[in-house]
Image: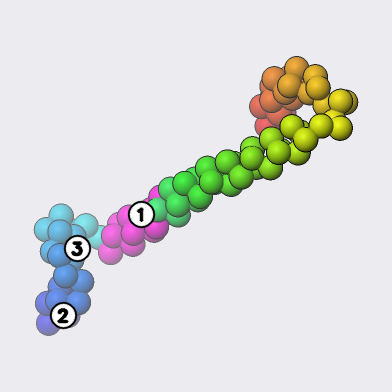
């Protein structure tokens, strides 16, 4: 019947789901969670590449000279970070 056609269409995942006796809502929620976690993992891995690019660009510009006013900028970064964390 309908159960066997769903089983054939779903493959091995359907077998595990049926064996666990999970409701349809639980299965849908777990698939949504899997999608979200996958998206987050992909975004974080891509974000690290953007961070490397950002550092590289700033490094090139700052090492080129002509930015004397930024010589001590590193001294205020911890305070800026704490301020951001405290206001969030």
Q: 58 or 65, which lies in front? A: 65
Q: Secondary structure at mark 3?
A: helix
Magenta-colored span: 24-37
- Horizontal side of residue 5 vs 69, given as left or right: left
Residues at marks 1 and 3, CA–CA distance in whole angstroms: 13 Å
**Residue bearing mark 3:** 13
Q: Residue at x 69, y 25 (%)?
A: 81
**Residue bearing mark 2:** 5
Residue 71, image x and y in percent?
81, 22
- Residue 26 forms part of the magenta stretch: yes
Q: 22 or 52, which lies in front? A: 52
Who comes first in sequence, dot 2 or dot 3? 2
Q: Is residue 25 visible?
A: no
In the rendered image, the vertical position of residue 33 relative to residue 5, given as above or below: above
- Horizontal side of residue 11 vs 43, given as left or right: left
Residues at marks 1 and 2, CA–CA distance in whole angstroms: 24 Å
Which secondary structure dominates the residues rendered in magenta? Answer: helix
Which mark is on residue 34?
A: 1
- Residue 5 forms part of the magenta stretch: no
Image quarter in which the N terminus is found? bottom left
Residue 23, image x and y in percent?
25, 60
């Amino acid at each position: 019947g309908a159960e066997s056609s769903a089983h054939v269409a779903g493959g091995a995942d359907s077998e595990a789901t049926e064996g666990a006796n999970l409701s349809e809502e639980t299965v849908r929620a777990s698939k949504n969670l899997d999608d979200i976690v996958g998206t987050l993992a992909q975004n974080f891995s891509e974000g690290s590449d953007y961070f490397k690019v950002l550092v590289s660009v700033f490094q090139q510009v700052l090492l080129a000279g002509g930015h004397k006013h930024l010589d001590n900028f590193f001294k205020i970064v911890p305070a800026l970070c704490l301020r951001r964390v405290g206001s969030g």
